[in-house]
Image: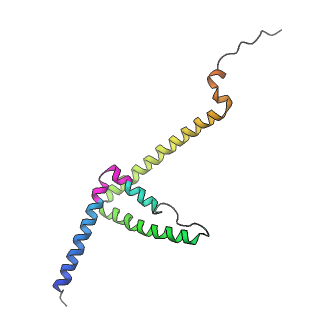
Amino acid sequence: MTDNADDKAARLEIEKRRKAELDVIRSIMMTKAGRAWIWNWLDKCHIFGSTFFGEETHRSAFAQGQENVGRILWLDVQEASLDQYVKMVQEQKEEERRLAKVREEDAKAQASREDPFFADNEQAMQPIDLPPPE
């Protein structure tokens, strides 16, 4: 059984289109902003979370459709540029640590504004002149 010339041409066209798709993904993944953009879409597609919304079955089904699209993108990104995918994950972990630190500092600042002891802490730390004991 030999290949038909039309079949071979069609296969070559499909391979050409696939290479072009992966080239586009590679070019996006070459910049930090591009990697952040891809991560954001993967996150929106529930790749890193759950698609379960309890009794809201329609919402769960919709989220599962988003996840399906996200998985296609996720696999394409890994196929196009695994090293840039790993770099993207590392960058995201660093960003998560940075945001956690900012949130912690904000929470401490908020607590100090709400606690009267800490609100006037500088004044509270000043020595108080007390009358001598009698």
Is residue 71 rendered to the left or right of residue 128? left
Which residue is depicted at the point 46% across and 70% down? 65
Q: Which residue lies furthest to the left in this view?
A: 5
Answer with left or right where residue 63 lies relative to residue 132: left
Quadrant housing residue 117: top right
> How was the colour assigned to the protein in this rendering?
rainbow
Residue 30 vs residue 86, the one in the foreground: 30
Give the residues in magenta: 26-36
Picture quadrant where residue 25 is located: bottom left
Secondary structure that dominates the magenta span: helix
Report the residue at 63% width, 25% height from top: 121
Residue at screen point 28% across, 64% down: 22
Is 21 above or below relative to 97? below
Residue 46 coordinates in the image, percent (x, y): 48, 63
Q: Residue at x 40, y 56 (%)?
A: 39
Task: Using residue 48 as the reference point, say whether residue 84 is left or right of it.
Answer: left
Look at the image and say whether residue 126 sits in the magenta stretch: no
- The number of numbered discs placed on residues in the rendered structure image is 0
Task: Give how far across and how far down residue 98 sits, in percent.
Answer: 46, 43
Q: Quadrant of the C terminus?
A: top right
- Tell me residue 120's x, y (percent): 64, 25
The N terminus, quarter of image: bottom left
Vertical side of 124 occupied by 29: above or below? below
Magenta residue check for 32: yes
Residue in the foreground of this view, choosing between 59 and 105 = 59
